[in-house]
Amino acid sequence: MFVPPSSRIVAPSGSAPRLDELGEQTVQAQVRSLVDELQSISDPRGVCGVRYRLSSLLALVVCAMTAAGHDSITAAAEWCRRAAPEHLAAFGLPYHPLLGRYRVPSEKTLRSVLGRLDPAELSAAGYAYLHPLLTDGPLAPTLRMPDGGIEREQRRAHHVTAQSAPVRRRRRAIAVDGKCLRGAKRPDGSQVFVLSAVRHGDGITLASREIGAKTNEIPEFQPLLDQIDDAVLAGTVVTVDALHAQRAHASYLHERGAHYLLTVKGNQKNLARQLQKLPWKDVPVIHRDDARGHGRFEQRHVQVVTVDNLLFPHAAQVLRIHRRRRLYGAKKWSSETVYAITDLPAEQADAAEIASWARGHWTVENTVHWVRDVVFGEDNSQVRTRNTPAVLAVIRDLIRGALKLAGYVNTAAGRRAHTDHGRVLALYGIT
């Protein structure tokens, strides 16, 4: 009869990229078992007929979808069936003494459980798991290939950082934005939307909330941020797009001790007209930013005006960003002018810092939405049962955050490095 091992599962040496000595000690000292962390989630199932612990099932799905090529529940169930007995024992699955093996949940079981979960509760548990690994500065672990070279994506990230002008950020920023899960539809034909709060820079998801069929992102803004503790939200800058340029949102953030940076467009006609009439011709450009990448040149000219009589709560500064773009090899430039407002006065946020927040808002698109669509194939997924689409979106965010904090700049490369079952379990501290 098989006896489950009591020692920690360790990936074979030389089979995958290794951490440097300092980063490895840091990660091993802080990582905790994902199975234990997920025990805080309430089980929606009845008492009778429960064969598997909820935390074990969720940890199985997270580990299965971490490996490259396992983007669906069907693939996750296949990953579980291919797992060795010592790996199944680490998840706490029940052992069948007559068959002499561990029971493995079926695809139907996984679908049934995922469809009943609360995405917001799972998102809170995922952030609680990642929180001890978060740092305010650059990530400590640095992955190196077996030959000692830094992987390509890390070299590119270091090159971009070296080229860009250093901006002294005195506050952390959170981006709030929604995403449509295009492949998922409700029984009434409506599409599923998920609203997320994401940290600038590393793209770690702090909270997530599914938007109901008969509502939109605006009334879900406050319930989403209610999931974030005051200790995390206080003092931070919340960046949102023009849809959330609402007076109620500004007042809510002020009550929570947070600050805002709101983009203003045509949906707020009176406010937009007031911003455009400011004497911009007399205001000098106090910040310039030239960049190149993604096949184009880009120039940004930033002007800032201090205000105290806007028709918007607590507004202190107005930002005008004039962008010019030109593709490589092209001669014509395209231009765009964007207005934004913030409640931070000039002594607390200068033009360069505000411009960095405005540009950093695209973290939620480039680091979160794009990765889930391209790397995990989220828009191609047609899972539609109950809450399953939103729950899978939260699981993808958890995987992306775990790989990011483990030192992988490229999520796809991180998934390819964790095709071995033992290495996946080691990533989440499952022993």
Image (spheres, rainbow, N blue to C red):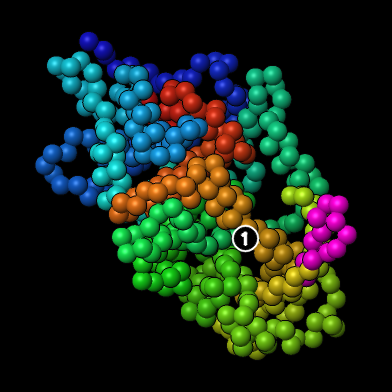
**Residue 248 lies in magenta, yes or no?**
no
- Pinpoint residue 75: horizontal percent, then vertical percent: 39, 33
Residue type pointed to by label 1? His
Is 332 situated above or below 132?
Answer: below
Q: Which image quadrant: the N terminus?
A: top left
Examine the image and state in which quarter residue 430 appears: top left
**Residue 327 lies in magenta, yes or no?**
yes
Q: Secondary structure at mark 1?
A: loop
- Pinpoint residue 24: horizontal percent, then vertical percent: 56, 28
Whether residue 368 appears in this view of the structure is no
Q: Would residue 112 appear left or right of 291 to someone viewing this image?
A: left
- Pinpoint residue 91: horizontal percent, then vertical percent: 32, 29
Q: Which image quadrant: the C terminus?
A: top left
Is 427 situated above or below 225?
Answer: above
Q: Which residues are magenta?
A: 322-334
Residue that extends furthest to the front in the rendered view of this protein: 189
Q: Would residue 331 appear left or right of 322 to someone viewing this image?
A: right
Residue at 73%, 57% in the rendered image: 168
- Pinpoint residue 197: horizontal percent, then vertical percent: 50, 59
Residue at 43%, 70% in the rendered image: 216
Residue bearing the label numbered 1? 361
Which of 77/228 is in front?
A: 77
Residue at 43%, 47% in the rendered image: 381
